[in-house]
Amino acid sequence: MKVARLDETFPQAELRRLEQTVSDPALRAAELPEQSQARHQQHAEYLASTRADETPEQSQSRYQQHSQLLSTNHGVKH
């Protein structure tokens, strides 16, 4: 039975994420180069449109969050 993400329980969400970790790499491995390029282009366009609507404060907040994430993951201080 399919459940909307907003209505899913924690175990359902965990199962969905687990299934995605298995299916996503398999799907990408089966992609043609043109399909991969199209997927990357769509993602880049999505990010550009999202960022175009940001206020300067939102942009700064996103930059700081990204910087913190990098320092946490790589042990680098910014």
Image (cartoon, helix red, strand yellow):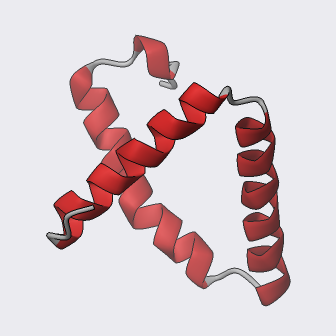
Which residue lies at the image location 81% right of the left edge and 41% below the top edge? 49
Q: Indicate whether 21 appears above or below 52.
A: below
**Image position, residue 10 (x, y; %):** 24, 24
Report whether 54 appears left or right of 74: right
The residue at 39%/44% (across/down) is: 64
Q: Is residue 25 left or right of residue 36?
A: left
Name, please, the residue furthest toward the top: 7
The location of residue 27, given as percent across then percent down, is: 59, 71
Write the residue at 22% across / 29% down.
11
Question: 24 above or below 6?
Answer: below
- Say whether residue 52 is left or right of residue 3: right
Q: In the picture, residue 34 is in which quadrant? A: bottom right
State which quadrant residue 28 falls in. bottom right
In the displayed orientation, state which residue is furthest to the bottom. Answer: 33
Residue 7 in picture, x, y percent from top left: 42, 11
Count of residue discs: 0
Q: Is residue 26 above or below residue 69?
A: below
Which image quadrant: the C terminus?
bottom left
> How far across and down, in percent of the image, does residue 17 sit?
35, 46
Residue positioned 38% across, 18% down in the render: 8
Question: Can you tell which quarter of the image residue 43 is in?
Answer: bottom right
